[in-house]
Image (tube, rainbow, N blue to C red):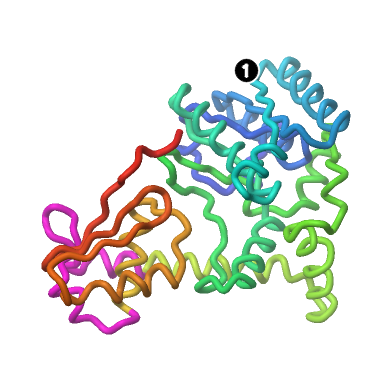
Amino acid sequence: MPAETSLLSVPADCLQQPIVIGLSGGRDSVALLHMLQQEGCELHAVHVHHGIRGEEADGDADFCRELCAQRGVPYEEHRIDAPALAAENGQSLETAARLARRAILRAAATRYGAAIALAHHADDQAETVLFRLARGAAGPRGMEPISHAEGCTWLRPLLGCTRAQLTEWLTARGLSWRDDSTNAVADVTRNRLRLEVIPALNRAMGRDVVPILNRSARLQSETLLALDAALTALPTEDPQGRLYLPFVLAQPRPLRKAILRRYLLQHEVPEVDEAMVLALDAMLPADAPTARRSLPGGFTAIRRQKRFYLEHTTPPTS
């Protein structure tokens, strides 16, 4: 059977490097593993057991271990106590599990000199757009097929296909996967969006809104890329990479906000939102020789005379 490439939405040259794949055992990551292996990728599968869901999670780990053994894919398994991490850090269980999982994937990518492949698809993208809009984000921004963050390249090769397409692809080839029973319970925000909100939007609009929300995400991405290109052409920074305030302060407030937001994201400051950008914008005028403000992730924003820059006051966590 010829290699199926139509469901993968990243350029072929992105798949020429070693790839760490987050393998849960679910439909999406199992499909991604098979598709990437068809492409001849050098794969390293990483499964994270979150210390929840009891025997079902044990079964997921067994399935992933056996699948990788059958396919000849190097496999590693990590066990964490997500409930304990959530309690310790004052986080939701979902957030604690996600952050721990990302840290494990980053560590594996560093060891193998690899990119990280995640199995998010078009339905996940629709949920992300709604989630961010409901939290007051600037526009219907979604996930990108290729992104760079936390010192790693993150690939999402399945963003161009739906959950139904993945199911059809696997079923046509007689390939099995594991179902997570918690995905069918509307107890966390993502599940409620998938199980309740999107079906309600489908009924209200009289059509499937997933492609529409994905198109909105694509258009927003194109707009942000255009804005980034325009900002790159402006003399916003000095040769040392600091914002040059005589130019920045001469710009209208919406453009200043865009310059600040881009600067923060370029330096990988976490949790950037409008409140942070407005607070930093307020400290730019030189009412005093120097102004400082602590930011998440161990960063400090400093305005000294005619320059604005960031210092990392604590080493980044791995």
Which residue sits at x=79%, y=62%? 192
Observer-nearest residue: 276 or 226? 276
Q: Secondary structure at mark 1?
A: loop
Is 76 or 176 nearer to us in this picture? Answer: 76
Residue 6 appears in the rendering: no
* Relative horizontal placement of residue 208, taking residue 242 as reference (left or right): right
Q: Quadrant of the N terminus?
A: top right
Q: Within the magenta stretch, is there residue 292? A: no
Q: Is residue 149 left or right of residue 239?
A: right
For badge 1, the amino acid type reads: Pro
Identity of the residue drawn at 37% across and 68% down = 226
From the image, tell me which residue sits under label 1: 74
Taking the spot 57% from the left edge, 66% from the top edge, the residue there is 217
Which residue sits furthest bottom? 252
- Residue 87: name its quadrant: top right
> Residue 305: image x %, image y %?
11, 67
Q: Residues within 10 Å of mark 1 (few under 14, many from 20)?
A: some
Residue shown at 79%/36% (left/top)? 52
User: Is residue 137 shown above or below 156?
Assistant: below
- Residue 229 part of the magenta-drawn span: yes
- In this view, 196 is above or below 154: below
Q: Nearer the viewer, residue 135 or 179?
A: 135
Residue 198 place in picture, x, y as percent: 78, 68
Tell which of 289 and 59 is nearer to you: 289
Start-end of magenta stretch: 227-254
Say if residue 275 shows up in the picture.
yes
Residue 131 is left or right of residue 302, and the answer is: right
**Vertical relation: 268 (above or below) 62:** below
Query: How many marks are shown on the rendered structure?
Result: 1
Q: Where on the picture, by quarter, is residue 127?
A: bottom right
Residue 100 x %, y %: 60, 37
Indicate the position of residue 287 as horizontal and vertical percent values: 17, 77
